[in-house]
Structure formats: C-alpha cells, structure tokens
C-alpha cells in the first residue's frame, strides 16, 4: 500500500475527501489485502469508526492516528489495524454499551490449512495485549463478478466455522456503512446472553 493507492481508494472508490493518518506499519498491514475491493471495505470500516471518534472527541476527520498492534492467532504472531477504547463507539452509534475494549482488523487471516478470510475482526482488552485478542468475525468481501456463482458453496463453508462470518456483497453492502452490521450483531449477541 502506498499513498497514491490510499488516495485512489478514498477519493475514487469510496468517493470521499479523506486522507487517513496512517503509520508506516498500518500502510504495510493494509497492503496485505488481496484486492482493491477488500481494501475499500476495510478503509470503509476505518472511516466509519473514525467518523464516530471524530464526533465524540471533536477532532477533524483524518486527524485520528491509525496504527497497528500484534496478536497471537493459531500459534502465530500477526499484525493488524488497531482501535483502542472502542466500546464507547458502540454506545454512540447503536445506543448500547456492548462493544469491545479494542478492535483489530487483520487482512488475509488464516482459519485452516490453505484457507483464509479476506480479513478478520478481533476483539481484545483495553491495551490490546497480544494474548487478549479473540477472532470475533471473519469477513468475506464478495465481488459480484467473481463470487456470484460460488455463493452457495461459500455459505456451506461459513456454516462449519465456530464464529460468525459476514459476507459483504458488493452489489448490496455500502463500504462506508457496513460496519454498523457488526455493531448490530454485537447488540443481538449481548441480548442473547441476557435471556
């Protein structure tokens, strides 16, 4: 990933005037996305979360520093895009205090031999300690042309995994708003645990 690609994804693909404040490590991690479509959806989530932070903290869009954190997954050290103190964002957006302490987005996360998700969303403790991270969602970005004939096969694969897999369909899910689905699923899960 480089600044020209970031600018292209933000200005041309997402059609927003936004230049995220990415560390060198964050640029490297974002460069692990397999396709520009996957990058676009990951940038969309970052923008969505940054927009909520911006409202809550009264900072301008693009001023929120985006960095990385390490985690242990399947016995290996991995690196992802890190958001600390995330739970207030859930309260701000969906009115429930059920968000994680912190979030980690990891492109091309492995879930079996020779299998990976386009990216994984991990939840961890407030400080993002390596051992605290747990894979909460597998994210698959399904471009219409590439995946339209494989969706039944993909659905079967998603059902044999122990955590939820979210399929983002290019023709349906807005890349700037899809992360709200995650928040809504967390609210549903929160109330299931209460019942």
Image: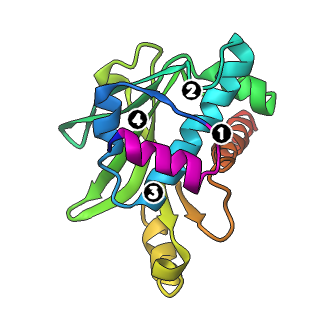
- Res 94 quadrant in image: top right
Measure the alpha-carbon separation of dots 4 and 1.
14 Å
Mark 4 vs mark 2, CA separation in Å:
11 Å
Residue 127 percent coordinates (x, y)? 41, 13
Q: What element carries label 1?
A: helix
- Which residue is the site of mark 4? 134
Residue at image position (69%, 67%) is 172
Q: Report the span colored magenta.
A: 3-17
Image location of residue 19, percent across then percent down: 52, 33
From this view, report whether residue 18 is shown above or below residue 115. above
Q: Mark 2 points at which residue?
A: 100
- What kind of element bears circle 3? helix
Question: What element does badge 2 sit on?
Answer: loop
Q: Are marks 1 and 2 in contact (CB under 8 Å)?
A: yes
In front: mark 2 or mark 3? 3
Sequence-earlier tag: 1 or 2: 2
Query: Where is mark 3, residue-wise?
Result: 38
First in sequence, mark 3 or 4: give its number: 3
Is 131 within the magenta? no
Quarter of the rendering containing residue 173 = bottom right
Residue drawn at 68 percent across, 11 percent down: 57
């Amino acid at each position: 990933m480089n600044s020209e690609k970031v600018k292209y994804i933000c200005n041309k693909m997402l059609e927003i005037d936004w230049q995220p404040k990415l560390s060198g490590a964050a640029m490297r991690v974002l460069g692990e996305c397999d396709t520009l479509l996957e990058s676009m959806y990951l940038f969309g989530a970052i923008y969505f979360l940054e927009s909520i932070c911006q409202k809550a903290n009264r900072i301008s869009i693009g001023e929120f520093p985006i960095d990385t954190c390490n985690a242990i997954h399947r016995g290996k050290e991995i690196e992802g895009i890190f958001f600390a103190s995330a739970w207030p964002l859930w309260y701000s957006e969906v009115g429930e205090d059920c968000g994680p302490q912190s979030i980690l987005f990891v492109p091309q996360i492995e879930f079996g031999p020779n299998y990976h998700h386009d990216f994984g969303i991990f939840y961890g403790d407030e400080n993002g300690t390596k051992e605290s991270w747990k894979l909460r969602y597998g994210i698959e970005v399904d471009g219409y042309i590439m995946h339209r004939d494989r969706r039944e096969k993909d659905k079967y694969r998603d059902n044999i995994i122990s955590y939820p897999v979210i399929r983002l369909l290019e023709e349906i899910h807005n890349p700037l708003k899809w992360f709200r689905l995650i928040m809504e699923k967390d609210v549903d899960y929160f109330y299931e645990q209460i019942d």
